[in-house]
Amino acid sequence: MSEETCAKCGVSRPVEYASESEHQPCLNCGETAIVLNRKLTDSIPVSDEYSAELIPGKQVRDWEQRWKLIQSDLQKVTSPNTGTMSQESIDSSQQQLTSFFIQLYSLKDALIQGKIVNGRDVEEAATDDPRLALLADLANLDKHTKLTKPPRSGHVPSYEQVSGVNNSTGSGWHLCLKVKHNTSVLDGIEIAQNAVTAWKEKLTGWRLI
């Protein structure tokens, strides 16, 4: 037996809403997320158990959903690490950052595939803006281990050194990933921050945010 309720105000909602990719807003409070409550009945009537499943209102991973996740994950990437600094934790932080490069660059494909912006305009933005061009090369390097096309940024970047550095405030430590690009040595986290800023400027210019 299942009962569906609003995740915010608890009002009962039609069970069939759970299978929809876009939930109808609650008539009482406007919330789209729902909670699906299931009653699990054992062979002995007195031992009934209940479980609840939270189903977010938006299921489609379009550019808007990706943009929200990017902003949330940027906070995770740039926040101080409070755990023990070790080879394992440094490697994990580096993996988190390089995966974020791929996630951040994939916004380009979401915009193109969703036909939100002219594909040529998006491609030009990813090439003409130095912050996004470098992001493209780093993301493609991480996915393919080597670039299969000429670098968008004009030079093939490379990771020079990774380390963990104690914060000056004494609260945890942060990842230091040095990226060599032509004659410059850049910080990986700053590259991520600059790329997010670049995308925000483009999305604003296209009147999407």
Image (cartoon, rainbow, N blue to C red):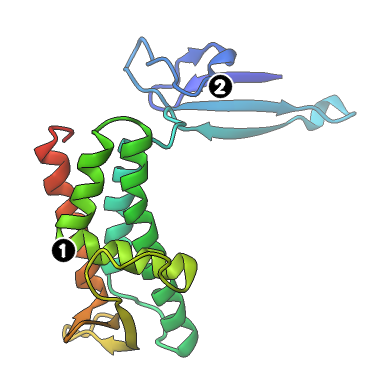
Residue 79 rendering spot, x and y as whole percentages: 27, 68
Q: Quadrant of residue 117?
A: top left
Most extreme residue toward the front is: 150
Residues at marks 1 and 2, CA–CA distance in whole angstroms: 43 Å
Q: Quadrant of residue 53?
A: top right
Indicate whether 77 appears above or below 53: below
Q: Are marks 1 and 2 in contact (CB under 8 Å)?
A: no
Q: Residues within 10 Å of mark 2 (few under 14, many from 20)?
A: many
Most extreme residue toward the right is: 43
Mark 2: amino acid: Ala
Circle on res. 146:
none
Residue 58 rendering spot, x and y as whole percentages: 42, 29
Q: Residues within 10 Å of mark 1 (few under 14, many from 20)?
A: some
**SS for dot 2:** helix
Residue drawn at the location 28% of the way across and 38% of the way down: 119
Circle on res. 18:
2
Circle on res. 130:
1
Q: Is residue 137 left or right of residue 96?
A: left
Mark 1: amino acid: Pro
Q: Nearer the viewer, mark 1 or mark 2?
A: 1
Residue 180 rendering spot, x and y as whole percentages: 25, 84
The mark that comes first in sequence, 1 or 2, is: 2
